Structure formats: C-alpha cells, structure tokens
Image (cartoon, grey):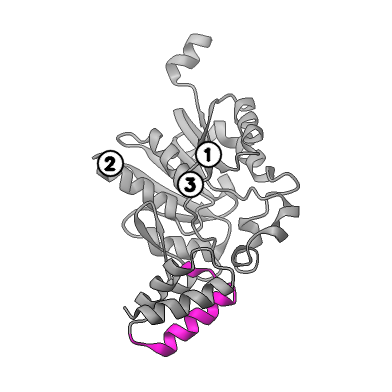
Amino acid sequence: MDARRVDDVTARLRAAGCVFAEEEAALLLDASPGDEGALERMVADRVGGRPLEAILGWADFAGLRVLVDDGVFVPRRRTEVLARVAALGLREGAVVVDMCCGTGAVALALRTAARRAGLAVTVLASDLDPAAVANARRNLEPPVGSVFEGDLFAALPEELRGRIDVLAVNAPYVPSAGISTMPPEARDHEPRLALDGGSDGLDVHRQVAAEVATWLAPGGLVAIETSEAQASGTAALLAAAGLAVEVVHDDDLDGTAVAGRMPSRSASAARI
C-alpha cells in the first residue's frame, strides 16, 4: 500500500472530522486496489458524512463481517456488550430473538456463540424498517434464521409467546432532543426510527417491558441496550414486569445493557 496515498487520504478524512482517519484510509484503499476513481468516490462520500460501513458494504462486529446496506442502522462496537449479555442465556434448544435487529448483527453473533459452544439453537430476528429487514435477511437467511417485519412483538409468530429463551433488544434510546447532537453519519444517514427513543429515550423500552413477561419462557433472559445514564430507568421497567434485573457496563466499549431474567417454573411454584 502506497504510504503517501495513505497519508493523503488520511489528511482529507481528518480534516472532515473523522476520528479514526488513518484506519479508515487504510480500509478505503484496501477496498479499491488500484482504482483511483473508486477510491475518490468513496473518500468523497466519507468526507460528505456517509457512514464508512455503508461505503465498504460491511461492518466488523464481534469479529464477524456483517453486511451493511445504505440507510440501515450501522452496528456499533458498544452493542457487542448487548450480544455478550444475551449470550449468557444460550442453552441447548434455545429460541433466540434479535428484536429491532437492524442488520441482524446481534443475531449473527449469538448464533456464532452458540455454535462455538456446541449448542443447537433457533435464531430469529425482527425489525419495523423494511430496509433493515432486507439487510438482515442478507446476513441471516439462510442459514441462520428467519427475519420478520413488524413492530416489536407484533412481528413475531404467536406460537413463540411464552417460548423465547433469549431476547436481545437494540431499540432506539436516544432522547428526541439529542438527535441533532449526534454525528452526521448517524443523524443524516440512518433512519430516525432506529435512533429516536422519545422524550426521555425510553418509549420503546416501555413497550418492550409491558409485554416481555408474556413472551419469555420460564427462566428466559431479555437483554436491552441502553446508555449508562438511562440504565436505571430501563432496569426499573423490567423489574416492574417481574424480572430479576442486572445492569452491565463495559468501559472499554462504552456499552451498557440491562438484563432481565424471568423466574423459572420451580421458583414460580415456590412463591405460590
């Protein structure tokens, strides 16, 4: 790779405000070997604020290459915390659902974790955005699992009610007033419905908490991504739904997830 060309692209990206300009320059050059026209188009797109992952057509998530289409929410490294917490609920024969799936990155990571552990699981995903559903299907169908289009639990087959062992939710949690302060690659290139969580960022979390207990299996786990500041609010919603709650934060990834565990049948019987 031409060091001078790397320096030139890096300088242009840095001037445009790209924090990881050198790493991005290397990726763009690698994606356009010897094609100066393609490189120029990609650099111009990135300088204009288009997400790097949409330009490349993929994102690195939990060590996996996830396909990313234009206009779809880009998986963040912080969401690896959500995938890690959700993986704690994996077991043989588990039914796993990635809700608000976007590209399907979390579903892909959970299926990979299950395979590495030698577990056979059923992995499903859902999203309200038709573009996200199409993108997730490219990543998941086949052989990972089916992707459904619709609003939260309404998207899922009724026969899953009371049978979900692992529910991973990356619902929007940015307060409406905070959208304007987000980086341009998010606020200008990703769908608002994937970002806007209402006045306090918890509107969709409330909707999930209101129904989650009827969809989880006994002992089932729900994991919801949130911010560190909002975690107590998300945790309170799940606790009010009757779940045992834990907040997990990773400083290195700057990621936070709230886990809620349904009582097992034996625990429920003991209380009765």
Q: Magenta span covers which residues?
A: 34-53
The residue tagged 3 is 253
Q: Residues within 10 Å of mark 1 (few under 14, many from 20)?
A: many
The answer to which of 92 and 169 lies nearer the viewer is: 169
Looking at the picture, tell me which residue is in the foreground, 109 or 178. Answer: 178
Task: Look at 63% across and 35% down and name the residue there.
Answer: 234
175 relative to 14 in the view: left or right: right
| Rendered-image quadrant of the N terminus | bottom left
Instruction: Say which quarter of the image contains residue 31.
Output: bottom left
Cα–Cα gap, marks 1 and 3: 12 Å
Question: In the image, is residue 172 above or below residue 119?
Answer: below
Mark in front: 3 vs 2:
3
Q: Position of residue 83 (x, y in %)?
A: 43, 44
Q: Residue 68 versus residue 127: which sits nearer the camera?
A: 68
Which secondary structure lies at badge 1?
strand
Residue beneath label 2, please? Answer: 120
- Magenta stretch holds residue 36: yes
Dot 2 falls on a residue whose secondary structure is loop
Quadrant position of residue 190? bottom right
In the displayed structure image, the side of residue 214 where residue 110 appears, left or right: left
Q: Which residue is mark 1?
A: 257
As shown in the figure, which amino acid type bears the numbered disc 2? Answer: Ala
User: Mark 1 against mark 3, which lies toward the viewer?
Assistant: 3
Q: CA distance from mark 1 to mark 2?
A: 25 Å
Q: Position of residue 233 (x, y in %)?
A: 66, 34
Mark 3 or mark 2, which has the lower sequence index? Answer: 2
Residue 141: x %, y % from top left: 37, 60
- Depth check: 195 or 184 in front? 184
Q: Amino acid at mark 3?
A: Leu
